[in-house]
Amino acid sequence: MSINIDFVDMSCDHVAVFDMSPKTPRPDAPFNTLAGLPPRLELETAAVLKACIPARAALAELNAATDFIPNPTILINTIPILEARASSEVENIVTTTDRLFRYAVDEESAADPATKETLRYRTALRRGHDRLEKRPINTNLAIEVCTVLRGIQTDVRRIPGTTLRNLATGEAVYTPPDGEERLRGLLANWEGFLHANAGLDPLVRMAVGHYQFEAIHPFEDGNGRTGRILNLLYLVEQGLLRQPILYMSGAIIRTKAEYYRRLFEVTSKGAWEPWVLYMVKVVEETSRWTTAKLRAMRALLSTATEFVRAKAPKIYSRELVDVIFEQPYCRIANVVQAGIAKRQTAATYLEKLAELGVLEPLQAGREKLFIHRALLSLLTSDSNEVQAYIQRATR
């Protein structure tokens, strides 16, 4: 199986014993000499330890920012959608954020295949987060996450022939190890490294573990997205992140060439420090980005609350405002399911909010959607400017 990669500069219960010495693989031959973890070098260099300090501080600030949003559903339904889109885009599954939010409440709707596939990322992230309550990250969890992502039953590769190729030239870039027993042995070693090296900072373990998972490439497809979900789950598991809402894939998209270059330089040169520094910096930058976005969402929520309470006191309730912030597209059924009102009254409430200019009605087939433009704009823009609500002129 050949897997295309769209970049050109590339200047990824068994007991096993591994040769820990690095060996540069041939791109067109299985990397069956992939060394087990940990690498035989100092991972926590002075530069790495220095980088971990602001990254941890940024994660702590992000955790505090989650308290700004009183309704946890808002967190679960918004930032993970952005992460899903960016993570899928890394692997050339392209859809728009608008489509994702429009179909977010019904993944089996009339959405196009790319949108459905991207929405499965959010579902897989939720599934993995739920599973963390019962078990730590392991091979079976990775299999379950990848199965949800792909929408088909997935298991560790048994058939050889998987090769990553340069999309522009068709040239082989990397061929991961093959043989199910070998792959399961490498995965067992990967699990052990994540959980048995308590002396290493979890951010370092995450970065090293992510390289190893991508290098093992245990599945026929979906390895990159699975690995990025596992990064978030690992930070949650290690107590560095309360909710899996870190928008890491956004930074990876912006630095995609560097992301792949750093991965391949670990394989070709054993360049672990630059890779770890890159990943720790991604955590720091995206923690700050996500924190700023949550604060802006909180400010917009306060603005909407004051506006609706002042302009429509008869329909105002905090629960109603919360519902229209759970995602940018609201349906009458969302209001009904929240227990706020029965269908006819719920429709009246949303029409009133549309009249006020808070929402914008959109006919989608037989169903009417109500778009929360201010929220959609905030989520899809790098700007954190909060828009004012302006009541529409009435005839």
Image (cartoon, rainbow, N blue to C red):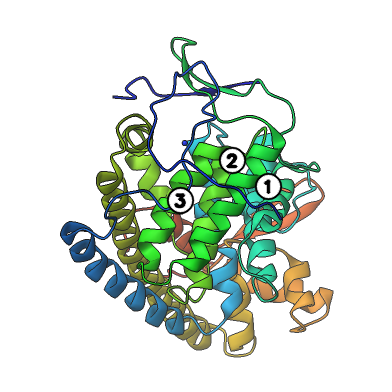
Please name the residue that numbered disc 1 is placed on. Answer: 146
Q: Which residue is found at the position 64% from the left and 86% from the top?
A: 315
Give the amino acid type for the residue marked by disc 3 in the picture.
Leu
Label 3 sits on a secondary structure element that is loop
Please name the residue that numbered disc 3 is placed on. Answer: 37
Q: Is residue 254 above or below residue 232?
A: above
The image quarter containing residue 388 is bottom left
Name the foreground residue: 277 vs 386: 277
Name the foreground residue: 167 vs 332: 167
**Callout 2: 10 Å neighbours few (<14), some, many (20+)?**
many
- Specify the quadrant that holds the C terminus: bottom right
Label 1 sits on a secondary structure element that is helix
Total numbered circles: 3
Q: Which residue is found at the position 62% from the left and 59% from the top?
A: 125
Is the C-beta separation of discs 2 and 1 under 8 Å? yes
* Mark 3 or mark 1, earlier in chain: 3
3 vs 1, front mark:
3
Q: Is residue 146 above or below residue 94?
A: below
